[in-house]
């Protein structure tokens, strides 16, 4: 049975959402994880707790508050309207923002652990070898934390592909805009089109398995040795 | 010639550091002290790795730090080489890439140590393409030394580079350190808690205790300071610089000439003219009023008693000055208090020192 046009559209939309979310999370998550790994500030634990919140919070709760926050009557939504911008709920950018918050811990935690494992010594050594702070980050931290980057990106991507509750709350079900895979499967089941649901579900199952397998293989290959 | 001026004062996590000293701009200065005396902290301050510590630091004509006047160069702007206790090679880079890491970051016009020169000095030619994680401890430490040298530092800081190594690896590194000492005119600050290491390598010595400086002077002078020598106990002794004069193959002896005179030691495998550093332990020096004939002791020197100090209930430590005026080398002798009284030793008395043993310093 071939995929319907809506299904193909849903697959592309999902991949686009996951890619954009992962890249933006890399940009936001890296400095956040670096700060969390290095700071001695009392703010560390509260910030770490907020970052981890999406791990335990039901996605519908997260989606509900985002909807209120970003909606036309919410503080962020009304501010955006005052600035002449469209509000985010039920749009693709809105989904991206929600997905970033929802997948944040999956990017930050592997990175934070990888940064903490490097410790201070390699950075001190690099400093005595004339490397500036940015130079040290690019030439020492990034290569040594490669498994952390890989894990964070893959988990954030996969987790975004699988999100459902948040999407329903804030994205709705607009084809080509917010109609992602998990919602499409739900629709098929609602319509008792089990064959279509099977096709997409089996695809996602295979995708998830392959991702985790690849991740494990890649991380096993790259520098299992600690810094010596 | 003074070209290192250092002043630091800080309270760090319950430890107080308060030092002020000057050191020569050449040769090896040992930073000696027991663990917890603040040696490593001081070394880190010199490198700028303790940004919270305020003070003053001038290396040759460059001021690296003068917090009173708002100068505080970050580590990567200081021309230091730093060899850490454990070698800390970057595991994601090959040996060659490790060596080039610092070198590439120094402008070509400021490089004074050549790549091949450093590689040869550290004995690394065969290891360059290896991954740094597949080296032995000694190889790794040699690579770390070469890596630091390749930044052409104005000051080389070494934090107990031998302490994490086994005996065999130490034997690999020592020649490398000695060549460094002889071939490159980079001042070295060498942290150690081993008097033996210090005696072999250093020219100058800074003695630290509880974050303070107790002595900063030439190695010979610090080692023969009475208050410090008493605390060294069995290890107390003097160091003499000498040159190999001749070999006596019949009796398997070698004569070394130093400023105190000639000293005979067991046959050495060194060419005449080569420098040799001799350790003369205080417990093996005895004193007599006349040059005695018929003694089994080969090395007898005329000396003058300079100072006498109680060592234990039964023993005293006597500092002796060799012939040759005010800055002549000093010896230490540990004798019984009874002998001291019987011989009526007092400062200024001319006597003879008998050296029961003198040994080339060999780690």
Image (tube, coloured by chain):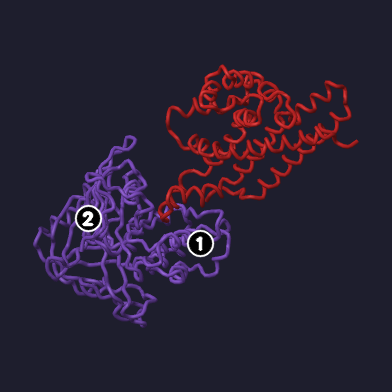
Chain colours: A red, B purple
Q: Secondary structure at mark 1?
A: helix
B188 or A7: nearer the eye?
A7
Instruction: Tell me: residue B152, above or below residue B247.
Output: above
Residue that numbered label 2 is attached to: B22
Quadrant of the rendering where the C terminus of chain B is positioned: bottom left
Q: Residue A31, how many percent across, how many down?
A: 50, 38
Say whether residue B196 is left or right of residue A191.
left
Which residue is disc 1 drawn over?
B139
Q: Give residue B339's position: percent from left, percent from top.
A: 17, 57
Q: What residue is drawn where x is 73% and y is 40%?
A: A211
Quadrant of the frame with the N terminus of chain B = bottom left
Q: Please report contact status of discs 2 and 1: CB closer than 8 Å, yes or no.
A: no
Label 2 environment density (alpha carbons within 10 Å; few <14, some 14–19, many ≥20): some
Classify residue B207 as left or right of residue B124.
Answer: left
Foreground of the two, A108 or B181: A108
Chain under callout 1: B
- B24 w.r.t. B208: above or below: below
User: Rounded to the nearest whole Å, what is the CA distance between mark 2 and mark 1?
Assistant: 33 Å
Locate residue B256: give its quadrant.
bottom left
Q: Nearer the viewer, residue A60 or B136?
A: A60
- Please say whether residue B302 is visible from this viewpoint: yes
């Amino acid at each position: 049975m071939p995929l319907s046009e809506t299904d193909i559209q849903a697959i592309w939309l999902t991949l686009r959402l996951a890619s954009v979310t992962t890249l933006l999370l890399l940009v936001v998550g890296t400095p956040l994880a670096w700060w969390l790994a290095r700071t001695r500030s009392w703010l560390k634990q509260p910030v770490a707790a907020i970052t981890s919140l999406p791990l335990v919070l039901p996605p519908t709760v997260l989606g509900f508050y985002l909807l209120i926050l970003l909606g036309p009557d919410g503080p962020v939504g009304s501010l955006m309207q005052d600035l002449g911008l469209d509000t985010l709920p039920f749009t693709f950018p809105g989904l991206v923002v929600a997905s970033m918050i929802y997948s944040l811990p999956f990017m930050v935690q592997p990175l934070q652990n990888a940064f903490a494992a490097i410790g201070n010594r390699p950075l001190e050594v690099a400093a005595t070898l004339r490397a500036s702070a940015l130079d040290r980050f690019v030439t020492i931290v990034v290569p040594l934390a490669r498994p952390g980057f890989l894990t964070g990106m893959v988990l954030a991507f996969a987790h975004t592909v699988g999100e459902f509750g948040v999407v329903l709350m804030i994205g709705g079900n607009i084809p080509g805009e917010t109609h992602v895979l998990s919602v499409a499967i739900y629709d098929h089941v609602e319509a008792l089109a089990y064959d279509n649901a099977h096709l997409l579900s089996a695809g996602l199952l295979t995708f998830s398995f392959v991702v985790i397998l690849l991740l494990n293989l890649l991380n096993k290959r790259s520098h299992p040795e600690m810094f010596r | 010639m003074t070209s290192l001026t250092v002043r630091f004062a800080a309270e760090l996590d319950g430890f107080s550091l308060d030092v002020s000293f000057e050191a020569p701009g050449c040769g090896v200065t040992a930073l000696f002290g027991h663990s917890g005396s603040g040696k490593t902290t001081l070394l880190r301050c010199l490198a700028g790795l303790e940004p919270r510590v305020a003070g003053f630091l001038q290396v040759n004509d460059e001021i690296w730090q003068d917090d009173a006047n708002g100068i505080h160069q970050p580590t990567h702007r200081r021309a230091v080489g730093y060899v850490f206790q454990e070698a800390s090679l970057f595991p994601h880079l090959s040996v060659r890439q490790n060596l080039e890491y610092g070198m590439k970051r120094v402008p070509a016009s400021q490089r004074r140590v050549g790549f091949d020169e450093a590689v040869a000095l550290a004995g690394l030619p065969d290891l360059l393409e290896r991954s740094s994680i597949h080296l032995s401890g000694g190889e790794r430490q040699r690579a770390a030394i070469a890596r630091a040298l390749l930044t052409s530092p104005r000051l080389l800081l070494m934090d107990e580079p031998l302490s994490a190594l086994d005996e065999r690896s130490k034997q690999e590194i020592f020649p490398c350190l000695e060549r460094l000492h002889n071939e490159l005119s980079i001042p070295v600050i060498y942290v150690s808690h081993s008097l033996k290491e210090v005696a072999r390598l250093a020219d100058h010595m800074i003695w630290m205790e509880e974050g303070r400086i107790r002595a900063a002077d030439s190695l010979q002078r610090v080692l023969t300071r009475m208050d410090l020598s008493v605390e060294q106990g069995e290890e107390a002794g003097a160091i003499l610089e000498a040159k190999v004069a001749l070999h006596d193959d019949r009796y398997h002896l070698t004569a070394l000439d130093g400023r105190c005179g000639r000293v005979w030691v067991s046959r050495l495998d060194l060419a005449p003219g080569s420098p040799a550093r001799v350790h003369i332990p205080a417990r093996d020096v005895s004193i007599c009023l006349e040059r005695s004939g018929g003694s089994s002791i080969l090395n007898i020197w005329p000396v003058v008693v300079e100072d006498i100090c109680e060592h234990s209930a039964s023993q005293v430590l006597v500092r002796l000055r060799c012939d040759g005026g005010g800055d002549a080398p000093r010896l230490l002798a540990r004798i019984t208090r009874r002998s001291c009284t019987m011989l009526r030793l007092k400062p200024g008395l001319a006597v003879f020192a008998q050296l029961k043993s003198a040994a080339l310093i060999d780690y």
